[in-house]
Amino acid sequence: MTVVLPTLNEAGYIETCLRTLLDDPFPRDRLEVFVVDGGSSDGTRAIVERLRSEFPFVRLLDNPKRLQGAAFNLALTKRTHAPNGSCGAMPTHATRKVFLRGASRQAQRTTLTW
């Protein structure tokens, strides 16, 4: 499964978001997480880099266009797993929503609570 997190100045939420997403029994060898950053200046990137030592399948990409669509497109060109499932998440406190699309092709909406 590929997880894409478009971010911009999410230092207050990115660690909780990642830990919540990764607190799942899904096989780690079948998971890749892309944090696609639009130029954060609040320490978001440093937090993600620190978490990479704990979760080596988390990758940090630059999103110079600073658009969510561009972030998803960029991450999906870098993925290594087959495109049978994907997950996009908005780490901001305002939404706390994760949109999942699995192999069944039926979309589910999950509200994360933290």
Image (cartoon, grey):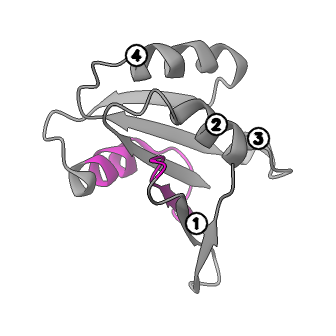
Task: Examine the rendered structure and indicate whether residue 49 appears above or below residue 90.
Answer: above
Secondary-structure class at tag 3: helix
Q: Position of residue 3 (x, y in %)?
A: 54, 50
Please name the amino acid that badge 4 sits on.
Gly
Task: Examine the rendered structure and indicate whether residue 7 appears above or below residue 56.
Answer: below
Please name the amino acid that badge 3 sits on.
Arg
Q: CA distance from mark 3 to mark 2?
A: 18 Å
Q: Upstream in the sequence, badge 1 or badge 4? A: 4
Looking at the image, which residue is at 18% across and 41% down? 66
Please name the amino acid that badge 1 sits on.
Gly
Q: Is residue 102 left or right of residue 20?
A: left
Q: Is residue 49 left or right of residue 53?
A: left
Name the residue carrying label 4. Answer: 43
Q: Is residue 23 left or right of residue 5?
A: right
**Range drawn in magenta:** 71-93
Task: Examine the rendered structure and indicate whether residue 90 appears above or below residue 52.
Answer: below
Secondary-structure class at tag 4: loop
Mark 1 surroundings within 10 Å by alpha-carbon count, few (fewer than 14), some (14 through 19), many (20 or more): some
Secondary-structure class at tag 2: helix
Please name the amino acid that badge 2 sits on.
Thr
Name the residue carrying label 1. Answer: 85
Name the residue carrying label 2. Answer: 16
